[in-house]
Amino acid sequence: MSGTINIDGKTVPYRDGQTIMDAAIAAGIYIPHLCHKPGFTPHGSCKLCTVKVNGRNCSACTFPAADGQVVINTSDELLQDRRRITQMLFVEGNHFCPSCEKSGNCQLQGVAYHLNMLDNHFPHFYADRRVDASHPDIMIDHNRCIFCNLCVRASREKDRKNVFDIAGRGINKRLIVNSVSGTLKDSAISVDDCAAHICPTGAILIKRSAYRLPIGQRTYDQRQISDVALSGEVEHGQD
Amino acid sequence: MRTFLQALLTKTQFQPVRLLTILRAVQAEFRHIPSSAVDILAEALQISRTQILAVAEFYSFLHLTPQGRYAVLFSDSITDRMLDQQNLLHYAAKRWNVAIGEVRADGMVSLHTTSCTGLCDQGPAALINGIAIANLNRPKIDLIAELIERQAPLAQWPASLFAVNDNLYKAGLLLKSSLDSGAAIRAACAHDRAEVFSELERSGLRGRGGAGFKTALKWRYCAEEVSDRHYVVCNADEGEPGTFKDRVLLNSFADQVFEGMTVCAFLIGARQGFLYLRAEYEFLHSKLEAVLERRRQAGLLGNNILNKAFDFDIEIRLGAGAYICGEESALIESLEGKPGIPRNRPPYPVSSGYLQKPTVVNNVETFLAAAQIVVRGADWFNVQGTEKSPGSKILSVSGDCLRPGIYEYPFGTPVRQILNDCGARDVLGVQVGGPSGTFISNRELGRCLAFEDLPTGGSFIVFDNSRNILQITQNFIHFFAHESCGFCTPCRVGTSLLKQQLDKIVEGHGSAGDVAELESLCRLVKQYSHCGLGQTAANPILSTLQRYPDVYQAQLKRISYEPGFDLDGALAVARRMANRDDAAAHLSQVEE
Ligand SMILES: Cc1cc2nc3c(=O)[nH]c(=O)nc-3n(C[C@H](O)[C@H](O)[C@H](O)COP(=O)(O)O)c2cc1C
Ligand code: SF4
Ligand code: SF4
Ligand code: FES
């Protein structure tokens, strides 16, 4: 089965089983997203991809496309609210973009540029989070984790290793590593794993690769995140 | 430890879906989940240790560090607070020689608070090693102090300490009439399934858990799903503060609830059912197991029920302290041994529920009502109630009234009548449907209980004029921030921001801009959250802001902006290090 939906006035075809996000990407329409990546089981947690479907807010990455849906993706209200949701992610952790080596390649930052986010708006939580630099090739700076679950899914679905999980409840959530010591060095991860490269923020970093490309010449320094997303997500955040 | 775990694993048949049951048992034995136990369990169940940690860290009643041999949790519902909970908590801390939020140095006692324990009509309440103690007072705290010092095992504590009452004040349609065991199953089997469905449909019964989905429709959708297995789940999580009617139904009417589940199983073709019982009601567990066993003996559960060639049994699974597990898809995740995180929908549980199989999830009261309808017919049921809300509703009434307890009314009953019946005077307002519902003021007492006007899962909390609107709201918002599962951004971060922002205002640091900011934050959390928790978390603020804008206004500073940050307070550390405290070492951030 297939049919069409309407996104911001444009008729967009879909195939059965596709989500609104899938149909949009195929049609060259960008819907801001952070926890979603084509090819991975949708998660639906960041809520950045919220669109209005027949008047109701839905996550485009999880909501199935159905014939005749009227979808609003671009409205002042949605843009403003997505900016606020992004700001929430910024104040929840500790994101010092100017000193982050992912700067310019970070999707969180890229989305913030795209949404014209000029300040953090909300008061900061100043969360007390650690850095795990135990692994010879990979490090995790928990200060920048946004709980998008991509590393969890990548490790499970692509690497077949199950290195990560997210534990805790509410604002006390934390990323945990599958090893007896709880640190990365004792886990099964290796630098070639998909999970080591998928993080949309600077939470999981590859050692000795920082600044290979100077800040200013990086992905989102050059192009809008919408453009990058639509030209195939593979390029996302690689340096 | 190894022998204990082996026995436990054998008993739970090495099933990862029983992880919660297993971890609860480990917690009870070792007062926490030791890291070595995590390793053994991970290996035996063939799941990752992170999966076990994720569960252990999600639920309030599971801990990775040791709790006291007597682990005490004081219920922190608004009604407990109205019954002097704060003073008693401090008194207990003094008498038991333990700091609030900590474990005593000798490991004997730990003292914490927990969300509503469902004993609002007999608070203040507490849980001791999971078992409820109602009507706490100083003599009881003194007695407990003695028992703790003597290290008396809980089983030897006086039974009177653990008495919990039904406080049933008004029985209506459902609670007045009793059913013979098996009557509903017999009635259902005597007819064509289609006839039973249409009778249920004609009754107009809507789910009693809050959302009010038509029960017959839910069962029919589930029955129509082609699958090798179907499941029936009774939602006895009852976490909404101020709600305790399911506790009473399970205590005194469990047979009818199980009967309703069995009828549902017959209709949808399920062989397995679950009662998901909230951890706070652990004291009902053995009693309910006995009821199930009695029903098995009587041929009402098990194989070939009443010789009608259908098999069905019910297993009780206990929660571990998480309000979100009342949300049906989170409940299913929890049943599967995972953290209670609500699923993406669609698919809905009726097509993909427990183990991705078609599953009916209903409230305790819904099953009880369905059993009676099947026996007595739709007309008996829907002569009461309103057009869109047929039948009666069982209410948990608590707060400022003479007779807090259980009341059953036809839908459409005005709030004023309920207030009269329970002996409420000088009413300021009523929280209908719990914190996620609506706060109505004393100018709205003519409003009616019904899905058309004031829907409710059963929580009805009365406040008199001595109460402070802002403190009530604050208690509710703190509750939601504490209970957010943390899956989605707007709720995880948003409820914490709501809490900060409301606290700022209530503590007298808010300015006009802060109320506007609070409102816009409310809207954001409501509109963008993934599930009902986030979508209703801001309701306490929204409904009180609408009714008492003056109360909020009176709390504001008369300047246009007030920072949320205490500049002078932040300098305290620097002052200590510099060893000075003169006037010049202080900063005032706003010109007074
Ligand atoms: C945060 C949250 C908590 C809930 N808690 C309960 C509960 O404790 N008991 C309950 O029956 N339903 C609860 N519900 C509603 C359930 O998701 C579900 O709608 C209900 O169990 C369906 O049963 P019913 O059709 O008989 O009402 C809750 C919903 C949400 C969003
Ligand atoms: S570490 Fe990165 S990929 Fe993993 S959950 Fe956090 S933000 Fe997402
Ligand atoms: S709304 Fe809250 S409780 Fe519901 S999924 Fe989101 S974070 Fe969890
Ligand atoms: S991209 Fe859809 S919720 Fe995150």
Image (tube, rainbow, N blue to C red):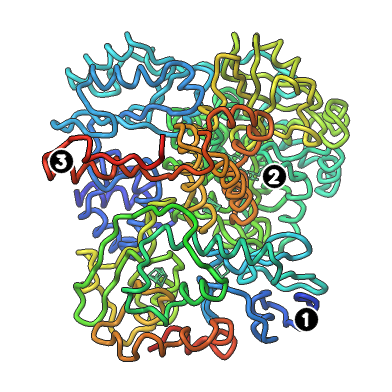
Determine which residue is flagged by label 2: B264
Q: Which of B163 and A49 is in front in this view?
A: A49
Return the chain for callout 2. Answer: B
Expressed as whole percent of the image width and height from the top left, the position of residue B134 reads 43, 18
Read off the residue under disc 1.
A1
The residue at the point 70 percent across, 43 percent down is B211
Q: Nearer the viewer, mark 3 or mark 1?
A: 3
Q: Which residue is drawn at 25% across and 39% down?
A: B586
- Picture residue at 26% right of the left edge, 52% below the top: B6
- The residue depicted at 65 percent of the width and 58 percent of the height is B358
Dot 3 surroundings within 10 Å: few (below 14), some, or many (20 or more)? few
**Looking at numbered disc 2 in the image, what kind of residue is underneath it?**
Cys
Q: In this view, does B524 lie to the left or right of B214?
A: left
Mark 2: which secondary structure? helix
Separation of residues labelled 2 and 1 (CA atoms): 34 Å
Of the pair A175 and A230, the residue shown nearer to us:
A230
Name the one closer to the observer, B452 or B541: B541
Asked if labels 1 and 2 touch by Cβ distance under 8 angstroms, the answer is: no
Q: Mark 1 lies on which chain?
A: A
Q: How far apart are marks 3 and 1 (CA)?
A: 71 Å
Q: Would you say residue A141 is visible in this rendering? A: yes
Q: Which of marks 2 and 1 is in front?
A: 1
Q: Is residue B273 visible?
A: no
